[in-house]
Amino acid sequence: MTDPTVPVVRARGLTRSYGTRSALDGVDLDLGPGVTGLLGRNGAGKTTLLRCLATDLDAGQGELRLLGRDPLRAGDRTEIRRRLGYLPQNPEFYPHFTAFGLVDYVACLKELGGRRARHDEVRRSLRRVGLYDRRHSRVRRLSGGMRQRLGLACALLGDPELLLLDEPTIGLDPEQRIRFRSLVSELATGSTVVLSTHQIEDVAALCRRVVCLDRGRVAFDGTPGELVERAQGRVWVQWERPREGVTTWRLADGRYRVLTPEGTGPVDDGTRTRVEPTLEDAYLLLTGVEREAA
């Protein structure tokens, strides 16, 4: 078991480049039990970070420790992979496998016990994601949402101590997303879960900590409430289309929701009304308005 005094994930100066472009630029991060939401624009470095944490990519420059071990060492890397679960974005599967056969194949790779114990774990994992009744179906005959749940079943095998989820709710309908949230909230009691997503409502519902990446760097690391607090006084609704230079969109009732850079909000004069920010507002201000101003 992991030493509770040692972070499950510890990164110092983590840097990873593709040619001349830096995907990660000096990331410092300590993660422990619970659900951490990983936010950022496309290209901010979220998937690269998850691939490093999943030992799919080496850390490049900097220091990385996972579950108290060094992923650059072959023996440590094997042990880390036994104890983590990883759902990549848009996972690809062998189309001629059955759902049961695919999850069983992953369980073999993770060396999960003998045949009987392994099959019991495969059945348990399929039940957790609601796919047990489709266990004999070929992967090619499953819908996109079912394939996403199948990938989650593979990631959940063996109750991993570190669970990495990259856009896990893509293709899930609202009922399935609620079931996913319930499952992740149960896992969070004893595991470290990193949830990379563009679905801000999933982060608001599940995460006690938020890490925002911007251009490969950590732009924010704190609680959802602390991020929302940074947006206080900077969100308005008004009837007239606002001036250029702010982030805005038209609401269903015809008004405009306006996000303004700090210190540049309009006057609350009856035609404009200041409103409480949401987590989505705060995220957009952090990565949109503030970035463009910079």
Image (tube, helix red, strand yellow):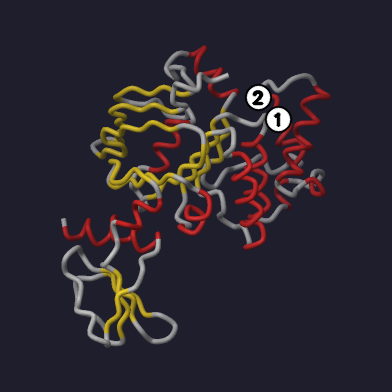
Spatial distance from mark 1 to mark 2, Cα to Cα? 6 Å
Label 2 near label 1: C-beta < 8 Å?
yes
As drawn, 87 above or below 5: below
Helix, strand or loop at label 1? It is: helix
Q: Amino acid at mark 2?
A: Leu
Mark 1, Cα crowd under 10 Å, few <14 / some 14-19 / many 20+, is: some
Q: Which mark is residue 233?
A: none
Q: Position of residue 5 (x, y in %)?
A: 45, 21
Residue at 27% over, 38% down: 22
Q: Quadrant of the C terminus?
A: bottom left
Q: Position of residue 110 (x, y in %)?
A: 65, 24
Q: How many marks?
A: 2
Q: Position of residue 292 (x, y in %)?
A: 20, 60
As drawn, 30 above or below 262: above
114 or 188: nearer the eye? 188
Q: Amino acid at mark 1?
A: Tyr
Task: Identify residue for label 2.
Answer: 109
Residue at 57% over, 43% down: 91
192 or 195: nearer the eye? 192
Q: Quadrant of residue 270?
A: bottom left
Task: Identify residue for label 1.
Answer: 105
109 or 132: nearer the eye? 132
Helix, strand or loop at label 2? It is: helix
